[in-house]
Image (spheres, helix red, strand yellow):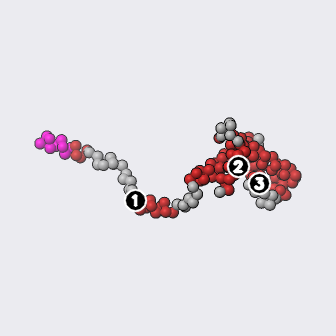
Amino acid sequence: MNNFLATEWAKARAQKRGGGREVLSLDLNAAEERFDLEPAEASAPDKEFDRRWAYALLDEVLQRLETEFAREGKADLFATLRPTLAGGYESQPYSALAVKLDMSESAVKVAVHRLRKRYRDLIRLEIGNTIAPSEDVEAELRHLFSALAA
């Protein structure tokens, strides 16, 4: 009787598979449906890697530039002029920016020129940090822009 009671007591205290944890269902059909909705990558993996690296590098440089402007107390100027980094004069007329910033149009032109120059310098600096000293920064810069164009 003692053995029977000990066995029953052990069975009652035993944890089932999973130890009382929530069961996670492996619904393969739902997973396949989810991945069917994902966009297919038409480019080769190495081209996709280069493209994502280029975007990550440009994002890092843009963050550094924004931090520099914020440190100098020019965060509003950066926020207003940021669209001029990617677009030309037509997309961001300097006259409209001058009114918004309460500056002369020529002062806006100079500010945009300095912003773009610093952006280019930071891109070159960041590329220089990612390559070996013997490699050419200009060649890597051309590769960066070709990755963005693809």
Residue at the location (77% across, 44% down)? 118
Per the rendering, the mark at residue 27 is 1
Disc 3: which residue: 84
Disc 1 or disc 2, which is closer to the eye? Answer: 2
Which sits in the foreground, 111 or 20? Answer: 111
Mark with earlier residue (3, 1): 1
The residue sitting at 23% across, 46% down in the picture is 12
Give the left or right position of residue 120, taking residue 7 as reference: right
Judged from the image, the secondary structure of the residue bearing numbered disc 2 is: helix
Query: Distance between the Cα atoms at labels 3 and 2?
Result: 21 Å
Q: Which residues are magenta?
A: 1-9
Q: Which mark is residue 46?
A: none
Relative horizontal placement of residue 93, taking residue 62 as reference (left or right): right
Task: Give SS at disc 1.
Answer: loop
Identify the amino acid type marked 2. Arg
Residue 143 magenta: no
Q: Which amino acid lies under the numbered mark 1 shown in the image of this protein?
A: Asp
State if disc 2 and disc 3 touch (CB < 8 Å).
no
Q: Quadrant of residue 1?
A: top left
Where residue 41 sits: x, y (%)? 56, 59
Q: Is residue 31 visible from the viewing direction of this image?
A: yes
Q: In front: 49, or 67?
A: 49
Instruction: Nearest to the eye among marks 3 and 2: give it.
Output: 2
Residue type at the position of mark 3: Thr
Q: Quadrant of residue 29?
A: bottom left
Residue 4 belongs to the span the image colors magenta: yes
Question: Residue visible at 80% across and 60% down?
Answer: 90
Q: Which residue is mark 2?
A: 142
Label 3, label 1: how far apart the Cα atoms are: 49 Å
